[in-house]
Amino acid sequence: MRVARNLEDLHSPEANVNKDTALDERGQPINDRTMKPNKHDILTGSRPDGTAYAAGYDYTCGNWTKSGAEGSAMVGHHDRAGPIPHPWAVSWNSSHLSRGRGQDNLRGTGGDGLFYCFAAK
C-alpha cells in the first residue's frame, strides 16, 4: 500500500501513514492509542517537514545511541491520534517529545521504541 508518492508527500498532511499502513516486520498491525499497551509513538527525531532539528537540539537520543532518563526523542503517532485534533498532535512524524530515553521511558509516553522503514518502489 502506498503511503506517499515522494519525499515531499511523505512529510505532508496527506501522507498515508496511519494505523492501517503502519505494520510491524511481520505485516501485523501495531497497537494504537485505544489498545493496551499503547504503542502508537514512532521514533523519528524530526520536525514536521522531516528535517533535523538545529544543532544543540538532541531529539534523536544521541543519534539513537543513548539511553536513560535524561533527554528525549521526538515521536509521531502512527494512528494519527492525539489529545486534541491539532496538526502537531496527530502528526505521524512530529507530535511530542518522549519522557526520556530508553525502552521504559519510551513506553511511558505511548511507544515501544519502534522505528519505521519505508521502501521505494
Image (tube, rainbow, N blue to C red):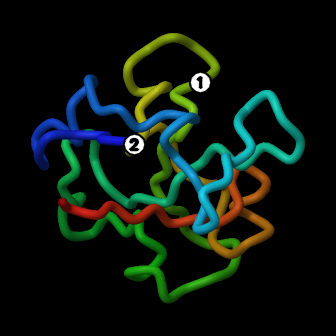
* Nearer-N-terminus badge (2/1): 1
Q: Position of residue 88 (x, y in %)?
A: 40, 27
Count of marks placed on residues:
2
Q: Give the label on residue 69, or none.
A: none
Q: Give the label on residue 94, or none.
A: 2
Considering every residue shown, the one lying at the far top of the view is 85
Label 2 close to label 1 by CB (< 8 Å): no
- Which residue is drawn at the image coordinates 79% and 28% (left, top)? 34
Q: Nearer the viewer, residue 69 or 107?
A: 107
**Left or right placement of residue 15 versus residue 121 in this view:** right
Q: Where is residue 79 in the image (x, y as percent from the top left)?
A: 57, 32
Q: Is mark 2 on a helix, strand or loop?
A: loop
Amino acid residing under circle 2: Ser
**Quadrant in the picture for the C terminus:** bottom left
Q: Position of residue 64 (x, y in %)?
A: 46, 80
Q: Give the label on residue 82, or none.
A: 1
- Which residue is drawn at the image coordinates 51% and 28% (left, top)? 80
- Which residue is drawn at the image coordinates 57% and 35% (left, top)? 19
Q: Nearer the viewer, residue 61 or 107?
A: 107
| Residue at mark 2 to residue at mark 1: CA–CA distance | 11 Å
Q: Nearer the viewer, residue 69 or 92?
A: 92
